[in-house]
Image (cartoon, rainbow, N blue to C red):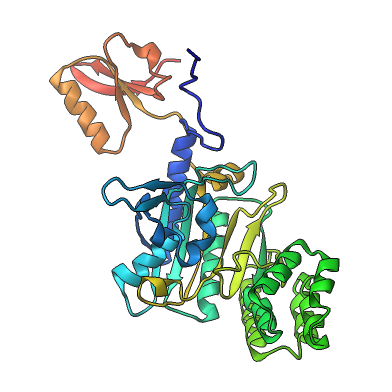
């Protein structure tokens, strides 16, 4: 009979041990407190639900990353959540049904059947914030600003922000009358900046539209890109100019609020094109192959849940923030060691200390003061003059 390593975990699935787990939990609380100060309300979504809900709207791109099972009660297919955003969209559209703007946030583990990249976890802790009910650039500015503040709180160094707008390509493709397949082929070529393919795919288009579509692959760089785009795309449809105006308004606000934050614009970058409807953004740091946080506008996703709503938001992996950042978390050795003694007065002293917020660990049979430091204690309860008192632990 073959030997089974019962301790072995699947690739990309990891356990988190102390003290790292304590750092992650402390970071989670600090970030959720930040979200609360901005007016975002915390929601908890189910780990598993019917596929029709999970893979609808913003979830369509999640099919390959979703673990699927059959519900023994109903016989229907269910999925373990690979992204919390579609679930929150359902809560806003169907469960809460508010008329005005709604700000929601979340933090929870997700599970990926396929990792985003070879080196990424398949069990990240997704952290995010979503703003529903407002279609103006003010909402996009707010969620991007909240993302910046989150990264600052986590003390992630050397962050730069990439911004784009899917409405620019979508407006040009629509004006050019591209079929679904041709639009997707050109989209794929733009993502790879494959100039020969882009040239071939646009050769038969009207000269002006073909030239504007080809220009998207090269409209990338600093703030000057937006000025160049307004000149290059001057003959574009009104929808394209509206998208550019939104991007300019967002850039102006971010430059005013965060003058030290490097902004990079790429009008051919169309991440999440199948469900995003407006501005898209992502945060990067040197040395990391992919984005450490991303988001964008995804209007009308709630329509499949009974109510179309403007929507914008972002998400990130809490474990990545803790790994890359230097968030202030108190990891100092601190705690009171109580001896293995069932004296009532000792018990009352332990309860009083815990009630005051102290961490108190009581020895189990066979343990002594020698075990105190391994339990994370730097003081001990000792009986002096008939009273249990806290004293420093001898080195």
- Judge by depth and name the residue closer to the eye, 381 or 15: 15
User: Residue at the location (50% across, 30% down)?
Assistant: 9
- Judge by depth and name the residue closer to the eye, 54 or 218: 54
Up-down: is 49 above or below 111?
Answer: below
Q: Where is residue 269 drawn, in percent x and y? A: 69, 67
- Judge by depth and name the residue closer to the eye, 381 or 197: 197
- Judge by depth and name the residue closer to the eye, 73 or 97: 73
The answer, for residue 105, to whether it is visible in the render is no
Q: In the rendered view, does 87 fall on the left or right side of 165?
A: left
* Residue positioned most to the top: 366
Up-down: is 341 above or below 275?
Answer: above
Q: Where is residue 58 drawn, in percent x and y? A: 49, 65
The answer, for residue 26, to whether it is visible in the render is yes
Up-down: is 377 above or below 219?
Answer: above
Q: In the rendered view, does 234 fall on the left or right side of 128?
A: right
Q: Where is residue 284 drawn, in percent x and y? A: 66, 56
The mark tally for this picture is 0
User: Residue at the location (13% across, 21% down)?
Assistant: 344
Up-down: is 199 above or below 53?
Answer: below
User: Residue at the location (76% across, 89% down)?
Assistant: 234
Quarter-of-image position of residue 141? bottom right
User: Residue at the location (45% across, 28% down)?
Assistant: 333
* Residue positioned most to the front: 75
Q: Where is residue 219 drawn, in percent x and y? A: 78, 73
Quarter-of-image position of residue 309? bottom left
């Amino acid at each position: 009979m073959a030997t089974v390593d019962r301790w072995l975990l699947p690739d990309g699935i990891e356990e988190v041990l102390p003290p790292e787990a304590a750092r992650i939990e402390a970071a989670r609380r600090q970030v959720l407190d930040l979200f609360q100060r901005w007016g975002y309300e915390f929601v908890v979504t189910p780990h598993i639900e019917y596929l029709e809900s999970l893979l609808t709207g913003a979830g369509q791109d999640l099919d390959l990353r979703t673990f699927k099972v059959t519900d023994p009660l109903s016989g229907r297919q269910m999925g373990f959540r690979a992204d919390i955003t579609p679930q929150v969209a359902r809560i806003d559209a169907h469960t809460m049904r508010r008329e005005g703007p709604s700000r929601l946030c979340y933090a929870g583990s997700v599970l990926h059947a396929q990792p985003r990249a070879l080196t990424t976890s398949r069990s990240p802790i997704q952290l995010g914030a979503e703003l529903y009910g407002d279609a103006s650039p003010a909402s996009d500015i707010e969620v991007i600003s909240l993302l910046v503040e989150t990264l600052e709180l986590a003390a992630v160094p050397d962050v730069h922000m990439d911004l784009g707008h899917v409405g620019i390509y979508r407006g040009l493709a629509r004006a050019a009358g591209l079929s679904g397949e041709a639009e997707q082929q050109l989209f794929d070529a733009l993502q790879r900046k494959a100039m020969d393919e882009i040239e071939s795919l646009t050769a038969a288009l009207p000269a002006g539209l073909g030239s504007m579509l080809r220009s998207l692959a090269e409209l990338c760089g600093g703030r000057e890109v937006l000025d160049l785009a307004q000149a290059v795309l001057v003959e574009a449809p009104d929808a394209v100019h509206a998208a550019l105006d939104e991007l300019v308004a967002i850039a102006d606000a971010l430059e005013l609020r965060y003058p030290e934050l490097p902004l990079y614009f790429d009008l051919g970058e169309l991440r999440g094109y199948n469900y995003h409807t407006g501005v898209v953004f992502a945060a990067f740091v040197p040395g990391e192959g992919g984005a450490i946080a991303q988001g964008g506008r995804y209007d009308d996703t709630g329509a499949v849940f009974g109510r179309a709503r403007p929507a914008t938001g972002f998400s990130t992996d809490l474990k990545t923030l803790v790994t890359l950042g230097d968030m202030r978390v108190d990891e100092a050795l601190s705690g009171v060691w109580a001896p293995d003694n069932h004296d009532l007065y000792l018990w009352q002293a332990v309860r009083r200390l815990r009630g005051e917020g102290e961490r108190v660990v009581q020895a189990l049979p066979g343990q002594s003061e020698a075990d105190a430091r391994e339990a994370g204690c730097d003081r001990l309860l000792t009986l002096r003059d008939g009273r249990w008192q806290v004293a420093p632990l001898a080195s």
